[in-house]
Amino acid sequence: CGAGGSTGVTAAVKLDHYPDVGSLHPRPMPYRELRSRLKAFGIVEHQSTGRTSRRFFVRRDAPDSGPFYPVNCKGEGREIEIPEIHALLRRFDIKPAAFWA
C-alpha cells in the first residue's frame, strides 16, 4: 500500500461528533424510512422534475422558499449514512435526540 491507500478497515462513526444524541444508537437507514421519519417533523420530499437520482427534502409549509436538502437516491432501499442524516437534521434545525428517539 502506498501513502494514502486504503487499509480495508471501515471507520466507525464517532458519536462524540453528535453530542445531542446521548445514549441513542443512530444507524444508517433506508431512504424510505428516512422519508417517513422526516414527515413527522414537517419535512417532505419535493416533487421536482430534475434528475431522478437526486431528490430534495423541503419544509411542508414553505416548499418553494424555505431550506432544502438534496439526497442522492438510487432506489428506495438505498442506505443513507449517519453523517448525511445529521447534515440533513442540521439544515432543518431538528434535534438529533428527537429524531433518533
Image: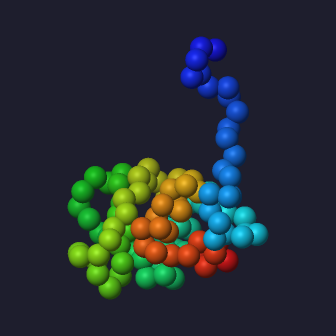
Depicted 73 relative to depicted 26: above or below: above
Residue, far bottom: 61
User: Relative to residue 22, is residue 48 drawn left or right?
Assistant: left
* Residue 49 coordinates in the image, percent (x, y): 23, 61
Residue at screen point 68% across, 52% down:
14
Pick the front one: 75 or 7: 7
Q: Residue furthest right?
A: 23
> Residue at (76%, 69%) from the top-left corner?
23
Q: Quadrant of residue 98?
A: bottom right
Residue found at the far top of this picture: 2
- Quarter that holds the N terminus: top right
Describe the colour scheme in one phrase: rainbow
Residue 86 percent across, percent down from the top left:
53, 62
Q: Identify the residue at image location x=43%, y=82%.
A: 42
Residue at the location (51% across, 76% down)? 94
Q: Is residue 63 above or below residue 69?
A: below
Q: Residue 69 appears at what percent x and percent y?
A: 37, 63
Q: In the rendered view of the protein, which quadrant contains the C terminus?
A: bottom right
